[in-house]
Image (cartoon, grey):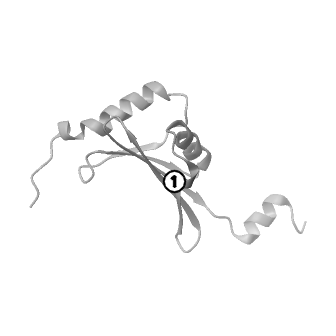
Amino acid sequence: MRTPITVSALGAPLTALRNLADEYGHLPAPSVSVSTLYPDTLVLTFYDDLAGFESWREALGVPSRNVSYGVQGGGRTRVLEAEAGYADGVVKLVGFATIPTVEEACSRVGVGS
């Protein structure tokens, strides 16, 4: 059994969140997560907003080569992940976006109409 963690042990990600809100308040708002499992990590998640992910990646100075790419959900969901050191902790960016089917992609560009 683990020893319970205190709120003060989450100081690094909570400080990072406060500082990021002050410094980058103009950027798109992500979903925010802090966990006792990773007490030094602030997770900023973007759902169907890869432009928001990219804005934060650039603001935090994460090189594009350090972004990992994956696919989940039977090939229907694109996943981007990146991390940056910030305020004595880690900020993890996660972006999810639906990958359109061929039919959806064609209908968006008017192919076949």
Q: Quadrant of residue 7?
A: top left
- How many numbered circles are shown? 1
**Crowding near the residue tagged with mark 1, few <14, some 14–19, many ≥20 C-alpha atoms within 10 Å:** few
Tell me: residue 63, above or below residue 22: below
- Could you say where residue 75 lies in the image, as x and y percent from the top left? 58, 72
- Could you say where residue 80 lies in the image, as x and y percent from the top left? 53, 57
**42 horizontally vs 69: left or right:** left
Q: Quadrant of residue 31?
A: top left
Compare residues 110 and 34 and report the one nearer the observer: 34
Residue at 51% from the left image edge and 53% from the top image edge: 66
Residue extending furthest toward the top: 22
Residue extending furthest toward the bottom: 74
- Could you say where residue 16 lies in the image, as x and y percent from the top left? 36, 34
What residue type is disc 1 on? Asn
Compare residues 94 and 107 and report the one nearer the observer: 94
Where is mark 1, residue-wise?
66
Residue at 28% from the left image edge and 49% from the top image edge: 35
Residue at 39% from the left image edge and 28% from the top image edge: 19
Name the quarter where the C terminus is drawn.
bottom right
Name the quarter where the N terminus is drawn.
bottom left
Tell me: residue 26, above or below residue 112: above
Label 1, secondary structure: give it: helix
- Could you say where residue 38 lies in the image, as x and y percent from the top left? 27, 51
**9 horizontally vs 92: left or right:** left
Residue at 23% from the left image edge and 49% from the top image edge: 36
Compare residues 29 and 56 and report the one nearer the observer: 56
Tell me: residue 25, above or below residue 97: above
Residue extending furthest toward the right: 113
